[in-house]
Amino acid sequence: MTLRFLLRKLRLGVVFPLIALLPRSMSYAFATALGYLDWILLNKSERSEVEIQLKNIPNFKNVDISTTSLKYAQLMARDTLDCYRMPKLNAAYESQFLEVVGLKHLVEAEKKGKGVLLLVPHYGRYFMLGPALRFLGHGFGVFTTAINEVTVPDVNWRRYLIRKFKNGFMYCGGDWITSNDSPIRIYSSLKAGRSLLLAFDGVESTSEKKIVFPFLGGQAQFASGALRIATRTKASLIYVSVKEVDSKLRFELSLLPENPELALKFAVENLEKDLIDKPWHWWLWRALPRVWTAN
């Protein structure tokens, strides 16, 4: 076992579970401090990768890259803490830190009875969408990549992700569908009028069918799964953005056009705006070469 392996085991098996026992403000302060230690001491290779990719983006030529990578490390630490706090969240107390904007779009879409596809990017602490909507009386299913020895070789990271999915799913109240399941489960869930969360900017898809959009001064390719699902089911489409605003999490729900191709185009444009607004919120900077090329 390497030192890196042992440190991750200690971090995910002991440190964050203990921090999660502290009062809310204190626990997130500790997580933010851990994010700083990650940035300055532990995850130097990750920091370097993030900063290299940020420097490749024409839109960020005036952005303080070092500060942005620090904020990225700290947000990732707070997101990790969310996983361990979820089992003990108190709706009455926690709701004051969760702000949902545009809930009317979800309510109106649910009334149509054709299903709702919640398109979310890997942006911000989006796993907290489950508690945020559940506390307001709305549930949804989720589609995720199957977590196993092949998709996540590191056993510590795999155990953490399984725990994170399970803890987040406690609040969702819908179907949990993975990439190992038949696509029929997705279509059936939406056609039954349910809501389903799908990350549209993921890099895990093995499908050769990609859709290319102008993105951040270059072009990006995204998996076509969301487009295929929306076209087949006629489900309503909503873009979901999760941002840290002071001590709160703000969940912004934006109704997308009924036309699936136009809807996905708008979703990508919304993601681009969000990245320019808070670039440290995007999880996928290290994977940028897999989805983005310069013009």
Image (tube, rainbow, N blue to C red):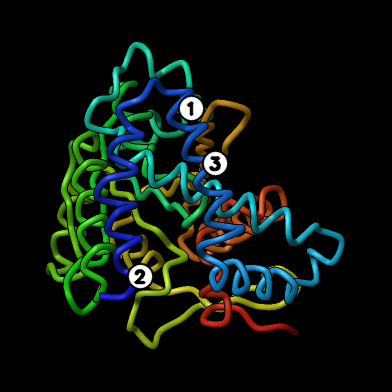
Compared with 265, 218 (above or below) is below
Is residue 281 among what the camera can see?
A: yes
Mark 1 lies on residue:
100
- Distance in Å between CA atoms under marks 1 and 3: 27 Å
x 33%, y 50%: residue = 197
Please state which of residues 18 and 234 is positioned toward the viewer in this rendering.
Answer: 18
Q: What crowding class fits label 3: few (fewer than 14 Cα within 10 Å), some (14-19), or many (20 or more)?
A: some
Q: Quadrant of the C terminus?
A: bottom right
Q: Quadrant of the N terminus?
A: bottom left
Q: Position of residue 59 (x, y in %)?
A: 79, 65
Compared with 285, 263 (above or below) is above
Secondary structure of residue under mark 2: helix
Q: Position of residue 177 (x, y in %)?
A: 18, 57
> Which mark is in front, 2 or 1?
2
x 38%, y 64%: residue = 226
Q: Position of residue 79 (x, y in %)?
A: 43, 45
Q: What crowding class fits label 1: few (fewer than 14 Cα within 10 Å), some (14-19), or many (20 or more)?
A: some
Instruction: Mark 2 or mark 1: name the one nearer the start of the chain.
Output: 2
The disc label shown at residue 3, or none:
2
> Which mark is in front, 2 or 3?
2
Check the image and name the residue furthest to the right: 62
Please state which of residues 74 and 124 is positioned toward the viewer in this rendering.
Answer: 74
Check the image and name the residue furthest to the top: 92
Instruction: Mark 1 or mark 3: name the one nearer the start of the chain.
Output: 3
- Disc 2 residue type? Leu
Please state which of residues 154 and 228 is positioned toward the viewer in this rendering.
Answer: 154
- Disc 3 residue type? Ala
- On the rendered structure, is 141 left or right of 50? left
Count of marks, rendered view: 3
Mark 3 lies on residue:
33
